């Protein structure tokens, strides 16, 4: 199975590395795209090492073989997983903005798209976020989570990202 993983700029980005590792261990072929702010939370080297291929780090990137990775990576992918889907990234996805590698890949991909929101409870409750999540659902995205649980702010509330294991199960059930 070929999986494209889009990593957003949130505190839960470190869990995307666990997802990447487990997908590879499950036999998936993996390519990773990161938003600019995702690099502030986790290094591209981690994902390059886990996936065995260059990270898509810019929306104007050309790979060594001369191909545009957002076309090459989406052409044969079975599934796009966006983790963590931050409030900002969800808004750009809902609007069809293509100015970062993750949104660009999403717009270029006609297959199964899964987004895993993760944010503070107040952010999750904000009408703009709920409106954008509804938009994504209407556009065919599967929205996995968030769940209630411990947040980085130090208390338990709705907004915690779904665990990578549950995402793997959802991805592999369509194998
Ligand atoms: C420590 C820290 C943690 C953050 N965690 C989140 C988060 O979990 N969810 C979220 O929506 N934004 C979070 N933010 C804000 C995002 O990092 C910010 O909106 C960023 O521009 C999102 O990048 P993206 O649109 O590339 O995902 C956090 C900011 C900081 C400083």
Image: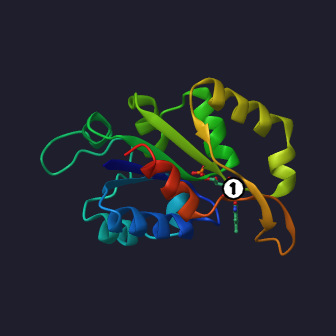
Q: Quadrant of residue 8?
A: bottom right
Residue drawn at 61 percent across, 44 percent down: 89
Q: Residue furthest bottom?
A: 154
**Side (left or right) of 66 relative to 68:** left
Judging depth in this view, the residue of 57 and 117 nearest the camera is: 117
Residue drawn at 18 percent across, 40 percent down: 67
Q: Is residue 41 visible?
A: no
Residue 54 is situated, as x and y percent measured from the top left of the image, at 27, 59
Judging by the rendered image, the residue that carries numbered circle 1 is: 118
Residue 19 is situated, as x and y percent measured from the top left of the image, at 47, 64
- Is disc 1 placed on a helix, strand or loop? loop
Q: Residue furthest top?
A: 138
For label 1, the crowd category at 10 Å Cα-Cα, with few meaning under 14, some 14 to 19 and many 20 or more, is many
Judged from the image, the quadrant occupied by ligand 1 is: bottom right
Q: Residue furthest left?
A: 65
Quick check: is the Cβ at mark 1 less than 8 Å away from ligand 1?
yes
Residue 131 is situated, as x and y percent measured from the top left of the image, at 77, 30
Q: Is residue 162 visible?
A: yes
Residue 134 is situated, as x and y percent measured from the top left of the image, at 72, 30
Q: How many marks?
A: 1
């Amino acid at each position: 199975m070929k999986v494209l993983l889009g990593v957003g700029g949130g505190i839960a980005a470190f869990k995307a590395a666990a997802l990447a590792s487990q997908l590879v261990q499950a036999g998936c072929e993996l390519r990773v795209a990161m938003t600019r702010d995702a690099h502030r939370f986790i290094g591209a080297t981690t994902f390059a090492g886990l996936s065995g291929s260059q990270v898509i780090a810019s929306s104007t990137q050309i790979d060594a073989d001369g191909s545009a990775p957002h076309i090459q990576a989406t052409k044969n992918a079975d599934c796009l997983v966006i983790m963590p889907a931050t409030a900002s990234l969800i808004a750009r996805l809902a609007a069809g903005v293509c100015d970062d590698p993750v949104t660009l890949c999403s717009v270029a991909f006609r297959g199964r798209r899964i987004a895993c929101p993760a944010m503070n409870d107040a952010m999750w409750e904000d009408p703009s976020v709920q409106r954008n999540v509804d938009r994504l659902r209407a556009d065919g995205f599967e929205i996995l989570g968030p769940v209630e649980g411990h947040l980085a702010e130090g208390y338990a509330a709705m907004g915690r990202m779904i665990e990578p294991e549950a995402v793997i199960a959802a991805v592999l059930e369509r194998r």
